[in-house]
Image (spheres, rainbow, N blue to C red):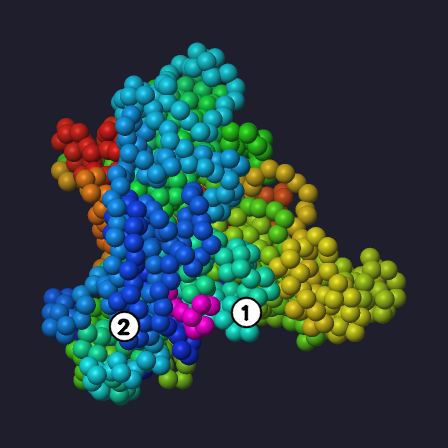
Amino acid sequence: MSTHIGKDFIPPDVPGKVTGEIKYAEDYKREGMVFARLLTSPMPSGRVVNIDASEALRMDGVVGVFTADDLPPVPPPGNPALASEYVTYVGQPILAVAAISEEIAESAIDKIRIDFERRDFVVDPIESLSPGGSNAYPEGNVLVRTQEEGPEGAPIVGAEIRDIKWPQSAIDAIKTGKEPVGGEFTTEWAFGDLDAGFADAATIIEEPFVTIGYPHHSLEARTGMAYWENGKCYFHGSSQSQSANNAGLARMLGIDLADLVFINEATGGGFGSKIGPYPFMAITGNFARVLNRPVQLRITREQEFYIGSARSGMQGWIKVGVKADGKVSAVDLVIVNDGGATGGGSGNSSAQHVTVAYQPESMRYRGISVYTNTTPRGAQRGPGQNEMAAVLAPMTDRAAAAINMDRVAFRTRNVLDSDGFQGGSQGPVTSAFVREALAQGARTFGWDEKLAQPKVNGSKVRGVGVGIGYHGAGGRGYDGLLRIAPDGRLFIHSGVGNLGTYSYAGTCRAAAEALQVPWERCEIVNGRSDKHLPHSSGQGGSNTIFTHTRTNWLAAQDAIAKLKEIAAADLGGAADDYGIGDERVYQSADSSIGLTYAEAAQRAMELGGKFSGQEYPDDINPLTQLAVQGLAGTGLIGVAKDNIPGQGQPPGVVVGFCEIEMDKDTGKFEILDYTAIADCGTVVHPKNFDNAMRGGAVWGVGMTALERHVYDPQNGLPANTGLYQNKPPTYKDVNLNTKMGGVNIPDPQNPTGGRGIGEPTQGASAAALASAISNALDGHLFNTAPTTTDMIINHLAGNSYSTKSLKTNTF
Amino acid sequence: MYSNTTKNGAMSVNSKLTRRRFIKGVIFSGAAATTGTGMYLAANAQSGQSAAERLVTLNINGRNRPVDVLPSETLAYTLRYKLDMTGTKIGCNRGECGACTVLIEGVPNYSCSVLTHNVKGKAVISIEGVKAADGTLHAVQQAFIAENSPQCGFCTPGQVMSAVALLNNNPRPTRSEAIDAMSGNLCRCGAYEHYINGVMRASGQLA
C-alpha cells in the first residue's frame, strides 16, 4: 500500500511563493554590491575594431569594465559570454560595466565608443544555403559536429563551422515542396527499404513545412549575483538545475568544485534555457573576483530576449507512404534547422518524433543546421519533437483520410508500444501504453460524438483534432543521498533544481515511501550546494521523475540495509531477520525487539565508517563525495549511485484531443474543449500532474497559434523583443477547463513506476490544436507552426500567406 | 490587514496613474529614457547620489514609511531596493507582465510603471501586506496553496494581488469575471487554470 507515491502533498516552497518570501537570484543583496550592465551589439553581424572605454572609466562611481579579454578565449563555434572580435547577433554582449549604481553603469555604457565594421548578415537558413548566400560567421554557415551530440541543454563541444551551399535547383525544390536533390547534409540515417516502402504504399503524402523559433522568455530574466569570500565563490544564479551547474560553473571560474557555493532557492522559469551553467554566468563570477566586490549582473527583459535562448526553427520536406491497411511503410524526411547564432538544431529529435508517432517500416532522415544572425538557440521544451508534432498532425490526418481511416484509429495503428522503437537507431523503450492513452482520451473527450455533430453554424465552423507528444523521460547513473538524524527525522538531500515543476519534491517522496517515514517527519535539503547536495541530473528533458525517484529510492535502500546491519549487530541475528516500519527497525519474528530510527542513527554515529558517511561507495560522483564528507558523523547516511540494470529510453507520452470554433470572417478561433491523457507510468503527485498537463497545454497553444521570432530581413533587427509582441498565451488565449488523466500503468524500470511528462504535454496540445485547425478548414494543410490568425484569414480569403515560401524568422 | 477603499468597478488601471502620465513624469525628471531599464543604487552609494532625492512618506501596508525617492523612481524600485520588500517582482519593467502588481487605493497597478512620487498619501498594499498581522494567510493565498497554483512562482505575488483586488470588489465572481480580472497578469508557465481554480476556491465556490 503506497503511503506517499500517488498522494497529494504541498511542496515546501509553495507557501513562500504565495507570500513573496521565497527568494530568487535578484532578491539577494550584499554589502558593497555593485551593479553590472551589459553593452550589447546593435548590429546583426560585424567586427569589433576598437573599444574606447576611457571616458566611462573616468566617471565617478564606475568601478570597472570587463571584456572578452578578461575571460578565456572561446573559439567558434562556442557561444562566448562576451564577443571578442566578431559579433553575430543583435543583442550579443560585448562588455560589462560595473558601477555603484545602475544609473551610473547605464550612463557609462553610453560613454563607451565602439568602432564596428559591418558584415553581411543572414536571418534565413535557406537563404544562407543558396548560391552566393551570406554566411553568419566568417568561417562559414553550418555547424558540423565532430563528436556525438550531448544531452539537451549541453553546451556544443566537438564541432566546427563549415561553408556549405546548395545548388539553386535544390533551393528551388525545397521552397516548392519537393525533395532538395543535390543538397548537402551533415546528419543522415536510414533504416528499412525505403523504395519498397513507397512501392507498397496505397497513398503518399508529400509536403513542405516550416516552424519558426521563439524565445523562452522565462519571466525571471537570468540575473545573477556573485561574491567571493576566503577563496570561495558564492553564486546566486537563476537556473533550472542545482547540482548540474557546479562542475561547469567551477570550470568557468577556474576553481575546484569544493570552492563553489551555488545558491538557487527558486527559479522563475527556464523551459530548457537554464538547464546548465550558461556562458553569461562567467561574467558575473569573474567580474566579482576581479573587483573583489559583490557584483549583480542584472539582465533586462529585452536582454533576456537576446541572450535567453530560443527554439530552433526548421524548414523541411517530408514524404510519407501509407499502406492500404493504415500502416506507415516509408518516411523520407529533410530538415534544415535554423541554429541562430549558436548553430545547433533539433532536427534529429524532430525525426525521432516521427519514428514514435508512425513506427515506420522504413525511414530516411537527412538534416543540416545552419547559422543565422539571430539569437542563440538551445533546448526549449521538447526541442524538435514538439514542433514536429505540430506540423505532422494535420498531415497525419490527411494520410488517414486518404485511406478512409479514422484519425484516432490511424494513430492507434501506427504509434509506439512497449515492443516498439524510438529514433534513427531504433532503440528500445522501457514501456509504452500510448494506445491505451488514445482509447482513454477518445472516451473522455467524446471523439465519436463530437465528430457526429454538425460542423457549420453560420459563419462559425467547428474543428476537432488529435495529436501526440513525445519526449524521452528519464536518465540513469546519478546519485541519491539522505540522512537519518539522531532525532529520527529523515533529511533527503536533493541536487535537483527548483524551476517550478515540483519534481524536486515529488522525487523525494520515493525515499520517504521506501523508509516508511511520515512526510511531516521528512525534510528536503536543497537550494544551496553548501547544504551537501548530491550529483543530480539537469532539471530538464522530462527526466527528473524517473531519474531521481530511482536515486532517492536507492539511497533509502542503502539506509535500510544499514539500519538492519546495526540492529543485527546490537540485538543479535542476521540483518535479513529484520524489517522496518513505524520508524523502527525490528526483528521480523518479534517486532518488540528493535531500534527506533533515532536510536539506530545514534548508533551509526558511534560506529562511524560507512554507517555515518566516513566511508562511501567508490562509484559516486565527486560532487556527491564532497556532500557525504560534509555530512559525515551527523547521522545514518544512505548514499548510492543508480546502477539499476535495464535498458531503453523511458518514454514520456501525452495524447491530446482538441475542439475549436473558428470564425470564418475573422480567422479567430476559440478552444471549446481540450482533453489530455498521459502515458507516464505511475502518477507520483496527482495535483501537480494535473497542473503540469494544464501548463503544457498552454505552451502548445503558444506554439501552434501565437509565438514566433520576427526579424526585419532588410536590417536584421528583431521586431518583437517584448512579451506582448512575441507573444506568450494569456488567460484569454487558452482553454481553462482542461480535462486530463493518466493511463497509470507503472513503468517496470522504476521502483515507483513513474516517468516524466514535462515536454510532451506541450507537443500533444500543439498537435491536437493544429489538427483541429486543419479539420475546421476541410483538411487544409498550413504546414506552419505557428499558424497565426493572419495566415488563416489569408487562406480563407484565397490569398497566399507569408510562410508559404518556407521563410522562417522573417515575414 | 488593510482597509478596503477600492472604488466601485475600477478594476483595470488607476485612471490617475496612466502610462502616459508615468512616461511624462520620467521625461520631465530628466532621467535616461532607456527601454525597460531600472536604475538601482548600490546599498552603500546613497551619499553623493542623493542630490535629487526627496524625503517622502509613503503609506505601505498600513504603515507610514519615510523614504528618500528620486524623481524618476518607480514604485517597484522603491519597494524592492529602498524598502527591501522583494516580494514584488520585476518581470518586464515595462508594463507587460504584471509580476509587479500592487494595490493603490485598492486598485491593482503595475508598480514598475508608477512613479513613487505619485503615490504620496495613497494607501499602497504590496504582497507583504496581504497576510494578516498574526501571520494568517489571506484566503487567496490559502487557496493558491491548496490548488498548488504557482509553478515557478515568479508571477505569483502579482497574481495574488489581482485576485485579492477582485474578491474585495466581487466576493463571488463567475469564472469568466475572474479570468477578466486576472488577465493583466502573465504566467509563462501557463498556470492560468490553477490560478482561476484558486480564485474560485478562495471565494468559496470550489470545495
Q: Is residue A295 magenta?
A: yes
Q: Quadrant of the C terminus of chain A?
A: top left
| SS for dot 2 | loop
Answer above or below: position of B121 versus A291.
below
Q: Earlier in the sequence, mark 2 or mark 1?
A: 2
Left or right, A75 with respect to A53, comes to: right
Q: Quadrant of residue B161?
A: bottom left
Give how far apart the Cα atoms at labels 2 and 1 are: 31 Å
Answer above or below: position of A243 versus B67.
above
Q: Chain of mark 2?
A: A
Amino acid type indicated by mark 2: Met
Which stretch did the figure color magenta?
Answer: A289-297
The x and y percentages for residue A385 are: 42, 38
Left or right, A426 with respect to A203, comes to: right
In front here: A453 or A599?
A: A599
Left or right, B200 with respect to A758, comes to: left
Q: Residues within 10 Å of mark 2 (few under 14, many from 20)?
A: some
Q: Residues within 10 Å of mark 1 (few under 14, many from 20)?
A: some
> As drawn, which residue projects farthest toward the right?
A572
Q: Quadrant of the N terminus of chain A?
A: bottom right
- Is residue B131 something that shows in the picture? yes
Circle number at residue A232 = 1
Circle number at residue A59 = 2
Q: Residue at x 39, y 56 (%)?
A: A68
Asked if marks 2 and 1 touch (Cβ < 8 Å), the reply is no
| SS for dot 1 | strand
